[in-house]
Amino acid sequence: MNDRGITRRRILAFLTAGAMGIGGSLYGLSRAGVIRFLDEDAKDEDPVQLQRKPYPPEPGREISRLGFGGIRLPILNRNDSEMDYELGQKLVDYGVRHGMNYFDTGWVYHHGQGEVFFGKVLKKYPRESFMLADKMPTWLVHSLDDAKRFFKEQLKRCQVEYFDNYLLHSISKFDEFQNVYEKMGVLDYLKEEKARGRIRHLGFSFHSTVPTMEYLLEKHKWDFALIMLNCLEWDDENEHRQSGYRAGTLYRMLTAKNLPVFVMEPLSGGRVATLNSKAKKVLEAAELGRSLASWGMRFAASLPNVQTLLSGMNKLDQVVDNVRTLSTDFEQMTKQDHETYGRALAEYHKYPIIPCTMCRYCMPCPYGVLIPETFAWYNSFAGEGLLPADAGPNDSQALRRKFLVSYNNTIPPLARANHCINCRKCLMACPQWTFRIPVEMEKIERFVAHVQSQYDVKKSVKSTC
Ligand code: SF4
Ligand code: SF4
């Protein structure tokens, strides 16, 4: 059997097994195993290719439907800035071999190392063969000179002469947009850079409200936009939606202005790729073998004005699964698929969670709180409807114990919610305005203390009997 046959068969077998939850997922491979897998794939002379789509602002240019989001690159340990260059290079090479030509980074990603990473790993490819996007770190700009310094340093870090797409990063507060980009003159400066050729297309990444979008579109001229878009934030026919963010409305506003829509968080930081066990059952009953991530990617990619989906990929099975979903064999969502997906999402929305996307912009907390990890741990119970509840169906001593033991095992004592002193530093960086970190920390702290007290009471009653 030739290498191509082996590689394709292995990918399919791993993905099917992983999606079915019966083991054999590529997650199970050691780092050395992943590297061996990638080396073997490199021998494939006719690899599956990603679908590409013409990019209207640049006639003749086509962009792959999947872009490499640089927010969650492979790292060597918990320190976010120690990049795993060997694995990262091979993952990027895998993407390129399969037709990927769009890479997205930002000043703050991996504490500045994200830009350096792409500078190094893309060096081997001709500059015109890939598109690189970078962003002005809006919330760190205090003067026009700051903005100029950031931009020049970004070109240096990325080892390029120009950026294909350049974005105003994270428009989330209207006042901040006006202050930085209009009053300080940073937007005019970026337009000058565009005229100089160091920016080819100018856009913004957006986390804000419909009125802010209206203002941006009426007042200024843009080439494209990057918005958070996924099935959980979609506001059409979604009465269960928890977030106040209105992805569907924003998408239609941009489409009406003929602006290509790039998508961030198509899987909402992994939430769409896991949903909950009840939602998973609905989707598995409809189509065995398709991963939840694949359903989520198809939801966004089936929208006609979606240009490219960015996915922060640091695991092999994420890259492989995304490439397969968005390949030239891409299957548009049908009406029946939408109905099935709607039923699954209704199950998911029954159990509200804290809508953190794990972007880690809030980190590090000066008081040591592990913010995203704490939310992820809490959501793992809340999203399954397994929070211990007084006198409810979940009111059992066993569940309280499981909840408290899990907290102890997941979050180290000095990094827990009770160490939040409401300094509000994280609020400045968090792009999600539909919840407030210190408020949620306080709620979690109170809830854990309550469960603990109930557990202790029951324990002491039992021991005195
Ligand atoms: S508000 Fe709390 S969680 Fe946020 S940075 Fe301050 S101490 Fe950390
Ligand atoms: S709390 Fe906000 S900034 Fe921190 S990881 Fe979650 S979404 Fe990102």
Image (cartoon, rainbow, N blue to C red):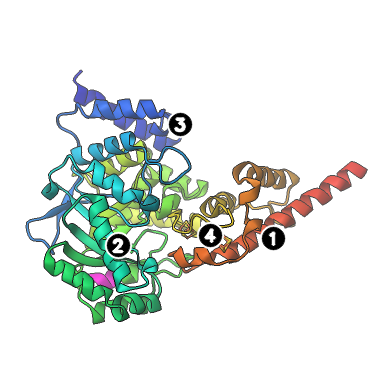
Magenta-colored segment: predominant secondary structure: helix
- CA gap between label 4 and label 1 equals 15 Å
Circles 4 and 3: CB distance less than 8 Å? no
Ligand 1 quadrant assignment = bottom right
Which residue type carries mark 1? Arg
Residue 128 in the image: above or below residue 187:
above
Instruction: Measuring from the top left, give residue 415's x and y in whole percent.
Output: 61, 50
Mark 1 / mark 3, whichever is N-terminal: 3
- Mark 4 or mark 1, earlier in chain: 4
Per the rendered image, the range of residues in magenta is: 251-256
Residue 441 position within the rendered picture, expressed as x and y whole percent measured from the top left: 61, 60
* Residue 22 numbered tag: 3
Amino acid type of the residue that numbered disc 3 sits on in the rendered structure = Ile
Q: Confirm or reject: label 1 Cβ below 8 Å from ligand 1.
A: no
Q: Would you name the residue on which mark 2 appears?
A: 150
Query: Foreground: 412 or 384?
Result: 412
Q: CA distance from mark 4 to mark 2?
A: 33 Å
Residue hosting label 1: 446
Residue found at the far top of this picture: 1
Residue at which label 4 appears: 354
* Amino acid beneath label 2: Phe
- Between the C-alphas of marks 2 and 3, the distance is 47 Å
Residue positioned 92% across, 44% down in the render: 464
Residue 232 on the magenta segment: no
Q: Position of residue 240 (x, y in %)?
A: 48, 65
Q: Give the residue type at disc 4.
A: Ile
The CA span between labels 1 and 3 is: 37 Å
